[in-house]
């Protein structure tokens, strides 16, 4: 097959490793992976988990204040607190999944 034998499409071997090279001279190989950038993206995304923890703290602080103001609504306030905590935990799980996606993406 003539197409596979052309020198322009053949991979360049450097130190026994086959790499694709860019079309322009002087640029780095296309196969280089910037691992540091993915770690930074993961770390920035994980900051939101701290925000979820802060939200849970504020939620239970509001529960204590609400129970101190109106003790007869104790069960209703606790139900609302658990619903809010469920939403915050869901957000934390989504953030962790996105951070993992950023960490292991190419």
Image: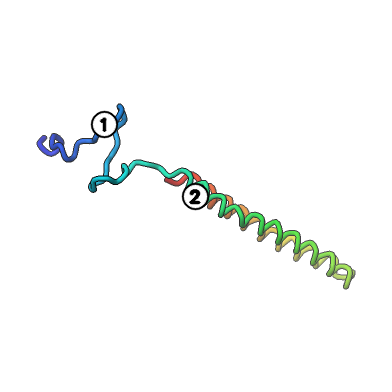
Q: Say which element carries label 2.
A: helix
Q: Which mark is residue 102?
A: 2
Labels in figure, total: 2
Query: Looking at the figure, which quarter contains the C terminus?
Result: top left
Left or right of residue 17: residue 46 = right
From the viewer's side, name the closer residue of 59 and 48.
48
Task: Residue lying at the far front in this picture: please name it.
Answer: 26
From the viewer's side, name the closer residue of 48 and 69.
48
The color scheme shown is: rainbow
From the viewer's side, name the closer residue of 3 and 13.
13
Left or right of residue 21: residue 50 = right
Query: Looking at the figure, which quarter contains the N terminus?
Result: top left
Residue placed under numbered mark 1 in the picture: 13
Q: Say which element carries label 1.
A: strand
Earlier sequence position, callout 1 versus callout 2: 1
Residue 78 image point, x, y percent? 80, 63
Residue 42 image point, x, y percent? 54, 50
Left or right of residue 22: residue 42 = right
Q: Residue at x 66, y 55 (%)?
A: 50
Q: Quadrant of residue 5?
A: top left
Residue 16 image point, x, y percent? 30, 27
Q: Are marks 1 and 2 in contact (CB under 8 Å)?
A: no
Left or right of residue 30: residue 34 = right
Q: Residues within 10 Å of mark 2 (few under 14, many from 20)?
A: some
Measure the alpha-carbon separation of dots 1 and 2: 30 Å
Does residue 63 sit above or below 29 in this rendering? below
Q: Which mark is residue 47?
A: none
């Amino acid at each position: 097959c003539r197409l596979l034998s052309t020198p322009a499409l053949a991979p360049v071997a450097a130190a026994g490793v086959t790499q694709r090279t860019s079309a322009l001279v002087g640029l780095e190989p296309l196969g280089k992976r910037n691992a540091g950038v993915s770690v930074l993206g993961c770390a920035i995304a994980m900051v939101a988990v701290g925000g979820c923890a802060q939200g849970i703290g504020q939620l239970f602080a509001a529960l204590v204040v609400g129970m101190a103001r109106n003790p007869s609504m104790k069960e209703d306030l606790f139900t609302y607190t658990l619903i809010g905590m469920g939403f915050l935990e869901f957000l934390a799980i989504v953030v962790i999944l996105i951070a993992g996606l950023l960490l292991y993406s190419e």
